[in-house]
Image (spheres, helix red, strand yellow):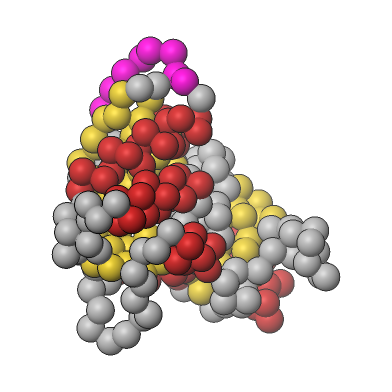
Amino acid sequence: MAALPSETPTNQEDEKRHAAATALRWVRSGMVLGLGSGSTSAHFITLLGEKVQAGELQIQATATSQASEALARQLGIPLLEPRRGLRFDLTVDGADELDAQLQLMKGGGGALLREKVLKTASDYLLIIADSSKYVAQLGRFPLPLEVVPFALPWVLDAVEKLGGAPVVRPNQSQPDGLYRSDQGNLLVDCHFKVISEPEQLALQLQAVPGIVEHGLFLGMAQAAVVARGEQAVVVRA
Ligand code: 5RP
């Protein structure tokens, strides 16, 4: 595991903003970008929007969530609708956990499906993260699954058989008290404590009908910017 600087960290929000600002170095005019979701990605979109408004960058983009799309639109970033053949030069996104091999856990913000779709259409995935996300082994953060509502009871059974403790993600502002993804699906957060064999778990989850997508992103990221304090370390695959 690459060593991060050991100085006393500043606050997490500063680290997120610092990682996002560092990621701007990867962006060139003319690029088509994928925009991630979550608070670190929101910092990136905001800083990118400032560059676009200042006329310093000419880019086009597609966002991985309705929230990121709304933010990008508000900032005047030209947006592209999904269409056949659309490819992204670079997608910049956050993560809930990443390790030294750039194995990722994502989906804490509930946007894992669109994030994986855009990643698959991208030539390069750059992860931006504060230091708390950099872990020796995945699994402390509960693994999110996007689940078709009809399949929920059997998905919960299947996750338990795989050794996980599933929790259906709540959202008190919804009439049924449950969180919905942008696709109208449920989110199930699975506590595994430690995920020692992520590739195997990913295959097992993919085989369960009703699990639309899981939050393990393996072998997908080319690089990550991890901020600790005022420093940013680039981790490469
Ligand atoms: C959303 C994600 C986010 O990238 C992840 O949850 C990190 O979020 P934040 O930047 O707010 O810590 O995967 O689905």
**Viewer-proximal residue, 150 or 28?**
28
Please indicate whether residue 230 sits to the left or right of residue 168 in the image.
Answer: left
Main secondary-structure element of the magenta-colored stretch: loop
Figure check: 152 above or below 170: below
Figure check: 122 above or below 225: below
Please indicate whether residue 174 sits to the left or right of residue 90 in the image.
Answer: right
Extreme-top residue of the structure: 7
Extreme-front residue of the structure: 54
- Total count of labels: 0
> In the rendered image, is residue 198 in sight?
no
Residue visible at 36% across and 42% down in the picture:
20
Residue 7, position as x, y percentages in the image: 38, 12
Residue 160, position as x, y percentages in the image: 64, 58
Magenta segment: does it hold 46? no
Residue visible at 37% across and 33% down in the picture:
18
Residue 17, position as x, y percentages in the image: 41, 37
Point out the image quarter for the N terminus.
top left
Residue visible at 62% across and 64% down in the picture:
187
Q: In which quarter of the image is residue 36?
A: bottom left
**Viewer-proximal residue, 106 or 164?**
106
Residue 4, position as x, y percentages in the image: 31, 23
> In the rendered image, is residue 234 in sight?
yes
Figure check: 150 above or below 156: below
Extreme-right residue of the structure: 175
**Viewer-proximal residue, 80 or 77?**
77
Figure check: 200 above or below 13: below
Point out the image quarter for the C terminus.
top left
**Region rendered in magenta:** 1-10
